Image (cartoon, rainbow, N blue to C red):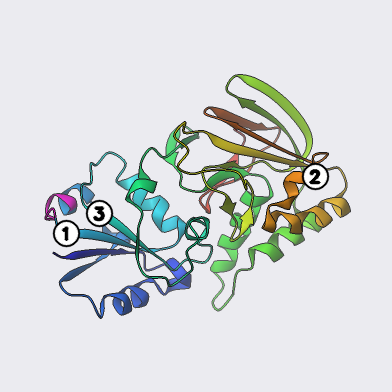
């Protein structure tokens, strides 16, 4: 029985390979595989024995990458996960901490929801949205290019609320029923409960819901000051009590359309200039 350890060298602010090597130091037979260099997952999986297993080392973006690049494959081996990213919202949703022992995630990668953006379809494991969360990921990506710069997504969001990000008008359609909201700051669609490194956007969302339903949360407010006072409550999931400014819906087919292009995030990965 051998472990096939797939790691993202860019995860954890560039510490992915070091962490993966440390993890395998106490393993028996194993193979270290740099995910950024894989061109044929099918060939790798086909070469594995039925008793072998996979270990994914990285963060939410790494899991997203694996889920999308293996979407058409039938993987019979057990899949484990070792969280070591900067956000780790998937692990948090399962009550796991960074650096915990690798744990099984095979069932969590089945029947994932998908989003279509600019004609391309992506699966997602945590959440997808554009608004200040997409803005935060875009700014975070820019800051990661600065040597030694530690990215603080909470600080980015607060600065965006105060100065740089402008609320928009959004039209959402859930299973055929449309609603339009003014002064929208956040409008993510959620498979899990968390995004943004600990924001409990959808506290009632169950990622193993047999119906496959996802949750959508709309946060709208004309006042920047009032929005800032609401923001901290998201980390505990208490924002859903503020029904004047917060609405949460569930459904199977969701469309979100903004009145102007904005950055969109899919499990923390950014796509810019998206309107729908």
1 and 2 marks in contact (CB < 8 Å): no
On the rendered image, what quadrant is the C terminus found in?
A: top right
Magenta stretch: includes residue 47:
yes
In the picture, measured across the screen, residue 52 lies left or right of residue 103, that is left
Helix, strand or loop under label 1: loop
Quarter-of-image position of residue 157: bottom right
Magenta residues? 45-50
3 and 2 marks in contact (CB < 8 Å): no
Answer with mark 1 or mark 2, whichever residue precedes in sequence.
1
In the picture, measured across the screen, residue 151 lies left or right of residue 9, that is right
Answer with mark 3 or mark 1, whichever residue precedes in sequence.
1
Quarter-of-image position of residue 111: top left
Magenta stretch: includes residue 131:
no
| Residue under label 3 | 78
Please report the residue visible at 46 percent of the width from the left and 47 percent of the height from the top.
Answer: 125
Binning the other alpha carbons within 10 Å of mark 2 as few (below 14), some (14 to 19) or many (20 upward) gives few
| Residue under label 1 | 52
Quarter-of-image position of residue 196: bottom right
| Residue under label 2 | 242
Place of residue 272 in the rendered image (x, y in percent of width and height, measured from the top left): 57, 46
**Real-space Cα separation, disc 3 to disc 1, in angstroms:** 8 Å
Place of residue 217 in the rendered image (x, y in percent of width and height, measured from the top left): 66, 40
Q: Main secondary structure of the magenta part?
A: loop
Please report the residue visible at 59 percent of the width from the left and 56 percent of the height from the top.
Answer: 137
Q: How many marks?
A: 3
Binning the other alpha carbons within 10 Å of mark 1 as few (below 14), some (14 to 19) or many (20 upward) gives some
Helix, strand or loop under label 3: strand
**Real-space Cα separation, disc 3 to disc 2, in angstroms:** 42 Å
């Amino acid at each position: 029985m051998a472990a096939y350890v797939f790691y993202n060298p860019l995860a954890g602010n560039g510490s992915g390979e070091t962490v993966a090597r440390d993890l395998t130091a106490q393993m028996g037979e194993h193979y270290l595989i740099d995910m950024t260099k894989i061109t044929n997952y099918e060939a790798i999986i086909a070469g594995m024995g039925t008793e072998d297993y996979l270990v994914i080392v990285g963060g939410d973006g790494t899991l997203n990458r694996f889920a999308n690049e293996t979407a058409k494959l039938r993987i019979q081996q057990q899949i484990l996960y070792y969280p070591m990213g900067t956000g780790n919202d998937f692990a948090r949703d399962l009550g796991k901490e960074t650096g915990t022992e690798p744990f099984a995630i095979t069932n969590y990668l089945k029947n994932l929801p998908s989003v279509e953006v600019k004609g391309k379809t992506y699966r997602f494991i945590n959440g997808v949205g554009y608004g200040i969360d997409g803005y935060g990921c875009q700014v975070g990506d820019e800051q990661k290019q600065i040597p030694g710069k530690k990215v603080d997504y909470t600080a980015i969001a607060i600065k965006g609320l105060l100065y740089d990000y402008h609320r928009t008008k959004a039209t959402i359609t859930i299973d055929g029923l449309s609603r339009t909201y003014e002064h929208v700051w956040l409008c993510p669609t959620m498979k899990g409960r968390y995004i943004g490194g600990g924001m409990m956007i959808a506290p009632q969302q169950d990622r193993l819901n047999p119906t496959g339903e996802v949750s959508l949360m709309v946060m709208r407010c004309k006042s920047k000051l009032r929005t800032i006072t609401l923001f901290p409550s998201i980390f505990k999931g208490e924002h859903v009590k503020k029904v004047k400014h917060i609405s949460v819906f569930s459904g199977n087919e969701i469309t979100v359309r903004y009145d102007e292009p904005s950055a969109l995030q899919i499990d923390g990965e950014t796509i810019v200039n998206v309107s729908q």
